[in-house]
Image (cartoon, rainbow, N blue to C red):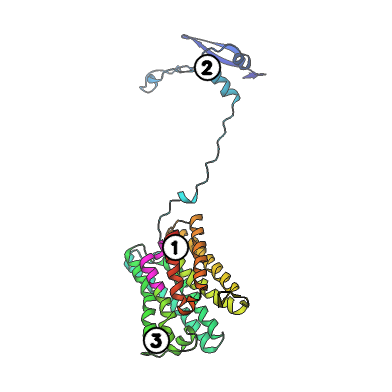
């Protein structure tokens, strides 16, 4: 019951109690003294063991603490945001079966069908002449490796995951050797993967390409940014450099007339953007922990790889060899 700022309060002195009018404002401003508020024992019969144990509860408050309780307002601050470095990520896989080995066998079949479907698509476009042969070759170059990485979460976190996944590009190594050595004729594959229609070309760029993806899957797998950097700079970076450079590369580099400013910018940009995309993709499954340091590392790798690719020595060596090797070497330093 309140009247203005006054209220009724039960004050206990020793064992007696009385009702008095209490003015909290005037009381707080007075000399500090100790107040004792009590909660009296209820007058129930003590027949039950529980009620017989009820005791009066006393709480002693000073005037300063009472003042704080009347006039202070307690506020809570929201917790600070968790930085990316403190994210607790647990590796997870999209299992196709409860048994890891069987699941990996299924994943190998699915990934193989996806990769072969895209290879078949580019073989048909090359056979029908839908794209220029060089453009068709670069479309194969860009898409196959990146699409294969999309399938990596299908595999389990067991040892069988990376081993069985590497069988897909590993099988392509054998295929390139058989066709490149002339043991088996496949004109559609030669048209879609060679520069000039010579089957022996498959023993160079296409063979290095398949070997890079195979070893990236076995050695580094999806838990390392090195596999992302090597494959993305080789597929997206080098592929876009050729496409954009041929179309818009009028201004050549002063130290290499076979390379252009536009092509080099396209390579660094495409390799970097693809690397960031797969960093976000794999981190969503918990395979790697994304961070700004990793973003900076991908940028450095893409720039250095582009510089190495623009050197005259790259004309003598195959880009499918120099680009992934440079990416892994630089990435081993910055990551």
Kindly report the distance in space between the C-alpha atoms of the residues bearing marks 3 and 1. 32 Å
Q: Which residue is mark 2?
A: 62
Kindly report the distance in space between the C-alpha atoms of the residues bearing marks 2 and 3. 93 Å
Let me know if residue 206 is in the magenta part: no
Element carrying mark 2: loop
Side of 333 where 273 appears, left or right? right
Disc 2 vs disc 3: which is toward the camera? 3
Side of 170 where 121 appears, left or right? right
Element carrying mark 1: helix
In the rendered image, residue 228, in percent from the top left (x then y), is placed at 45, 65
Let me know if residue 217 is in the magenta part: yes
Element carrying mark 3: helix
Side of 23 where 235 appears, left or right? left
Is any part of residue 106 visible from this angle? no
In the rendered image, residue 296, in percent from the top left (x then y), is placed at 51, 58
Q: Which residue is mark 3?
A: 180
- Rate crowding at label 3 as few (under 14), some (14 to 19) or many (20 or more) other CA atoms within 10 Å: many
- In the image, which residues are magenta? 212-227
Q: Which mark is residue 331?
A: 1
Q: Is residue 236 above or below residue 44?
A: below
Q: Residue at 49% across / 51% down in the picture?
A: 84
Disc 1 vs disc 2: which is toward the camera? 1
Q: Predominant secondary structure in magenta? A: helix
Q: Earlier in the sequence, mark 2 or mark 3?
A: 2
């Amino acid at each position: 019951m309140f009247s203005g700022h006054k209220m009724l309060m039960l004050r206990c002195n020793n064992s007696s109690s009385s009702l008095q009018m209490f003015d909290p404002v005037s009381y707080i401003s007075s000399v500090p003294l100790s107040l004792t508020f009590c909660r009296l024992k209820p007058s129930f019969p003590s027949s039950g063991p529980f009620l017989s144990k009820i005791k009066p509860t006393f709480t002693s408050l000073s005037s300063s603490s009472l003042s704080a309780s009347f006039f202070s307002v307690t506020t809570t601050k929201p917790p600070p945001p968790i930085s990316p470095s403190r994210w607790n990520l647990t590796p997870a896989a999209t299992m196709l079966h409860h048994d890891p080995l069987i699941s990996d066998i299924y994943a190998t079949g699915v990934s193989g069908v996806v990769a072969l479907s895209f290879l078949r698509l580019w073989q048909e476009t090359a056979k029908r002449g839908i794209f220029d042969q060089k453009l068709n070759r670069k479309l194969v170059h860009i898409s196959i490796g990146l699409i294969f990485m999309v399938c990596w979460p299908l595999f389990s976190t067991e040892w069988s995951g990376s081993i069985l996944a590497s069988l897909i590009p590993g099988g392509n190594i054998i295929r390139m050797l058989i066709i490149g050595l002339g043991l088996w004729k496949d004109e559609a594959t030669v048209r879609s993967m060679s520069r000039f229609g010579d089957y022996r070309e498959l023993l160079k760029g296409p063979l290095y390409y398949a070997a890079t993806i195979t070893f990236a899957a076995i050695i580094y797998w999806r838990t390392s940014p090195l596999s992302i950097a090597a494959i993305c700079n080789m597929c997206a970076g080098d592929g876009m450099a050729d496409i954009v450079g041929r179309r818009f590369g009028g201004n050549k580099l002063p130290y290499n007339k076979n390379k252009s400013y536009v092509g080099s910018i396209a390579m660094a940009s495409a390799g970097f953007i693809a690397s960031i995309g797969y960093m976000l993709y794999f981190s969503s499954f918990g395979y790697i922990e994304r961070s700004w340091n990793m973003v900076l590392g991908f940028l450095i790798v893409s720039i250095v790889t582009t510089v190495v690719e623009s050197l005259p020595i790259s004309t003598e060596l195959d880009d499918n060899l120099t680009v992934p090797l440079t990416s892994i070497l630089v990435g081993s330093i910055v990551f």
